[in-house]
Image (spheres, helix red, strand yellow):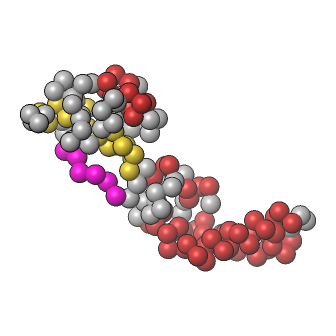
Amino acid sequence: MADICRKKGRASDVALLRDLCPVMETQSLCEMGRVMARTVLSALDAFGSEIEQHFTKKVCPAGECRAYMTYHILPTKCVGCGACVDACEDEAILGKPRFIHVIDQKACTQCGRCVSACDEEAIIMAGADKPRAPPRPIPIRRR
């Protein structure tokens, strides 16, 4: 289950859990092992389609798994100050002064330093629903 939440899950993991949990439930030496097996089976039964989307669509529908979250700069709030660029040690933020900055999702390690550095609160974390953002830095229009 942890692999699924960390973007490392596969369909075979669910099949393995479905095979192992009944065995754990009957063979565990402690009550904790039996409870965990029942809990995992209940989660698979109740949320199977949501769990499946983690490895088929590469999204967390609930927006809870941090590995599936991405950071985005809202064009309506970005003032092009560059504070986020300076804070990003991964050089994942593209932009220059007076341009709306853009986060390169492939380079971003989701450290969150940019969020802390942005006084305009223009950087947000998003799950399955991503905000609209320009594909590259664009000049800021007068507001």
Q: The N terminus appears in which quarter of the rendering?
A: bottom right
Query: Which residue appears at 38% of the width and 31% of the height?
Result: 114
In this picture, is 11 found above or below 131?
Answer: below
Query: Which residue appears at 76% of the width and 76% of the height?
Result: 22
In this picture, is 36 found above or below 110?
Answer: below
**Residue 10 locus on image (x, y percent):** 54, 63
Name the foreground residue: 106 vs 129: 129
Q: Residue furthest right?
A: 29
Task: Find residue 108 and report its image quarter.
Answer: top left
Query: Which residue appears at 46% of the width and 35% of the height?
Result: 111
Q: Report the side of 131 relative to 11 (left or right).
A: left
Q: Which residue lies furthest to the left in this view?
A: 142
Q: The C terminus appears in which quarter of the rendering?
A: top left
Image label count:
0
Residue 134 sits inside the magenta stretch: yes
**Residue 13 locus on image (x, y percent):** 60, 65
Q: Main SS of the magenta segment?
A: loop
Would residue 73 be visible to someone looking at this image?
yes
Would residue 88 be visible to someone looking at this image?
no
In this picture, is 74 found above or below 130?
Answer: above
Residue 76 sits inside the magenta stretch: no
Highlighted range, magenta: 129-135
**Residue 61 locus on image (x, y percent):** 44, 63
Q: Report the side of 79 relative to 120 (left or right).
A: left
Q: Residue furthest front?
A: 143
Q: Report the side of 43 relative to 68 (left or right).
A: right
**Residue 40 locus on image (x, y percent):** 68, 68
Query: Which residue appears at 20% of the width and 42% of the height?
Result: 76
